[in-house]
Image: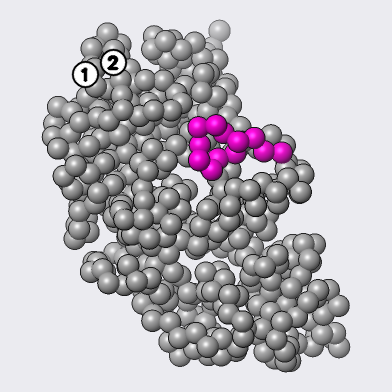
Amino acid sequence: MRLLKRFLEQVGSKMNPEVLSIDSKRFTLNQELGRRQFSRKSLVYAGTYLGRNRRLFEPGSQLLQMLAAEEDTRKVHLDRDVAWLFVCGRDVFEENIRRVEGELELGRYCLVMFDGRCIGYGRYETSAGIRVIRNLFDLGDFLRREGSD
Amino acid sequence: MVVSREETNKQFFLDRYRTLGHRLAGDEKTPQAIRVNTLKTSDAEMMETLTSLGVKLARVPYLDHGYVVEESGFSLGASIEYLLGLYSLQESASQSAAQTLAPNAGDTVLDMCAAPGGKTTQIAAYMGNRGQLYAVDVDRRRVYALENNLERCGVENSLVYRGDVTSMEPGTRFNKVLLDAPCSGNYVTDPSWFRKRSIKDVHGNAEVQRRLLSAAVRHLESEGNLLYATCSLEPEEDELNMQWLLRNHEVALEEIDGPGERGLTEVFGQKLCEEISRCRRFWPDTAHTQGFFLAKVVKR
């Protein structure tokens, strides 16, 4: 929970979900699942996937969509071409950001948005003297992760 | 002249299909299809977006949210919209399984051989992320793919178990069960099918399917519905399994409307229960889909 909380703070969220842990994975249950008794034996996935603990917390896409719906979270919006490069794992140059919501601070996380939906997140930082959103997670991971399982 | 095993197999199976009333060439294809994920978007919005990207789609008349891809300049399995879970790639006949089960928000549903999750995510969409959807599969890698699909498509009402569903005790009974059974498949979606399949495989799969059918009936509550589906054209895995089910369990078959043809009631000279005609069979030459079989069972 500590790693998840730290991540939520980093991105500017006030969310405080009730968390169900399955190994290193973190989930939250909607009301209907939450009030249901169910066997935990052989359970590998439940409800809404938030992400998993590694060295840091690695958010899943469902958590990112939830965060994107919050007004207070920091967001950068991209056009399709730049969004495509981002989901291919590339960083985003500041000049290619179309619009910013909230205040970008060096070293802090922000959600990366395309067409009103979250396609990943990154950290605002300086790289070789250029300001970029460093790609920390993007939805292209869905294609990459199955190949590397 | 040396005839390859593939050629011998091909002739053997095509002869069987001819006996069952269909003169197939053995090279029929099914067009790529997508299903709009109504948990995240609408058909109209998705059509507008994909059309603006140069994709030509045609609505499949018998599907709620299915479209055949007529033309696309890019891979639809690697677009931003796909990664956002706004649609899934799912063959037309395959989409009709969850549609026929018709799950809704009040249901407790079991998806027995769920991975990689195309039908699971479709069921969740019909349920509007309400109710409870239990998804089970035995294979670790395939369960991983299932988890990824659930996440991508924004499914929030599922519990996924990894294990053998025939010995599992989930602690509840279900009013709807989908058994999309592991089967021999068909040559439409697998170009190497004639090379690797034999009638022995078909019989082996039919036996596994019967064990799964028994488990499905056990997991169902009384008057609950089981939707049995295979992507096999072989009667041993389809109508003959339904004949076995009717004889060994307190169940009945319900009429399935829609595309495809009625289930066979005479197979290789063997007369079957008339009730089996209520099932649905998709032949590649007339339905223009992969081979597919659907049966809607009610537990008495």
Point 20% across, 58% down: residue = B172
The range drawn in magenta is B56-67
Point 51% across, 14% down: residue = B24
Q: Is residue B110 visible?
A: yes
Numbered label attached to residue B273:
1
A121 and B52: which is toward the camera: B52
Chain of the residue on which disc 2 is drawn: B
The quadrant in which residue B129 appears is bottom left
Element at label 1: loop
Chain of the residue on which disc 1 is drawn: B
The quadrant in which residue A58 appears is bottom right
Q: Number of marks in the image?
A: 2
Name the residue tied to disc 2.
Answer: B265
Looking at the image, tell me whether mark 1 or mark 2 is earlier in sequence order: 2
The reply to whether the magenta stretch includes residue B62 is yes
The vertical placement of B148 against A28, above or below, is: above
Which percent across, then down, holds residue B249? Answer: 14, 34
